[in-house]
């Protein structure tokens, strides 16, 4: 955080604190990180919780999961097993229409969600017959430790720290009625667009699609996306 504060003041032509309070600049820098990570979904994490036999709904409102933006993948691992089984996502109301949704018990194969972060509930289908572990892979917001401790790192993908600076500068100029805020907002928006594209996949491979079974069933993603495999 300290280095980003210094870079922000340099762009505001203020070497030492005078017009802009440190707490205000720190807040804008962090707000920039939150905005970028929310829109680009570039912070990815995973965590687990224990599923209880006979309990179908689990709250993701506090602790480990209170920074969730959106869930990407869910797997289930029964007690005593090493295999993680991917769960298919189904709409909450579609699941409720199934006759086995509540009373039927078995190893979960599907999940639904209800509510919104940070008041999100995850529902397992079928109702777990035994205890197990639910593994979540999700997009999250940056932690706020840097707001109170300038030695803490502002969570943003490496190489994109300038986004936070540009955001803070444009917010400061906007508040000061300095028309240059439009220039810095344009710069911020351009860099954010680049991050959104890059964050789709943090590697340069095209990816593969499984379109059948047996030899030759794996084809490059671009063939499918281009409609060549229709």
Image (tube, helix red, strand yellow):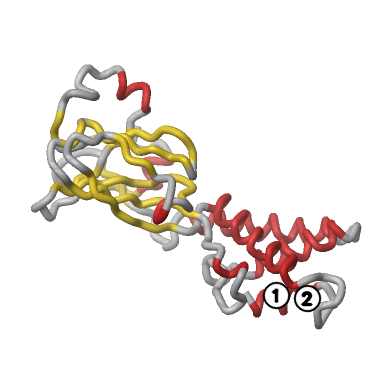
Image quadrant occupied by the N terminus: bottom right
In the depicted view, which residue is nearer to us: 31 or 164?
Answer: 31
Dot 1 and dot 2 residues touching (CB under 8 Å): yes
Residues 115 and 217: in front is 115
Q: Judge the density around disc 1: few (<14), some (14-19), many (≥20) Cα neighbours within 10 Å.
A: some
> Which of the 4 image quarters holds residue 112?
top left
Asked if residue 216 shows in the view, the reply is: no
Q: Quadrant of the C terminus?
A: top left
Secondary structure, mark 1, is helix
Q: Which residue bears the numbered disc 2?
A: 9
The relative height of residue 91 versus residue 4 in the rendered view (above or below) is above
Q: Is residue 120 above or below residue 153?
A: above
Residue 2, above or below 181: below
> Could you tell me which residue is drawn at 82 percent across and 72 percent down?
12
Left or right: 48 as drawn, with respect to 26 = left
Q: Which mark is residue 5?
A: 1
Label 2: element kind: helix
Residue shown at 58%/50% (left/top)?
39
Q: Position of residue 37 (x, y in %)?
A: 55, 56
């Amino acid at each position: 955080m300290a280095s980003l504060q210094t870079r922000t003041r340099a762009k505001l032509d203020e070497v030492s604190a005078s017009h802009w309070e440190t707490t205000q600049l720190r807040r804008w820098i962090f707000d920039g990180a939150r905005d970028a990570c929310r829109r680009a979904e570039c912070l990815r994490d995973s965590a687990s919780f224990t599923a209880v036999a006979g309990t179908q709904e689990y709250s993701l409102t506090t602790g480990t999961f209170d920074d969730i933006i959106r869930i990407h993948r869910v797997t289930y691992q029964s007690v005593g097993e090493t295999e993680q089984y991917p769960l298919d996502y189904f709409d909450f109301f579609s699941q409720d229409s199934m006759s086995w949704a509540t009373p039927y018990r078995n190893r979960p194969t599907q999940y639904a969600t209800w509510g919104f972060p940070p008041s999100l509930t995850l529902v397992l289908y079928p109702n777990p017959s035994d205890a197990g572990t639910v593994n979540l892979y999700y997009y999250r917001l940056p932690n706020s430790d840097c707001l109170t401790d300038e030695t803490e790192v502002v969570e943003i993908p490496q190489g994109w720290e300038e986004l936070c600076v540009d955001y803070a500068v444009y917010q400061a100029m906007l508040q000061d009625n300095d028309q240059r805020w439009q220039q810095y907002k344009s710069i911020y928006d351009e860099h954010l667009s680049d991050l959104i594209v890059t964050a789709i996949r943090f590697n340069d491979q095209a990816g593969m699609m499984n379109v059948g079974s047996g030899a030759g069933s794996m084809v490059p993603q671009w063939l499918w996306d281009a409609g060549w495999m229709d």
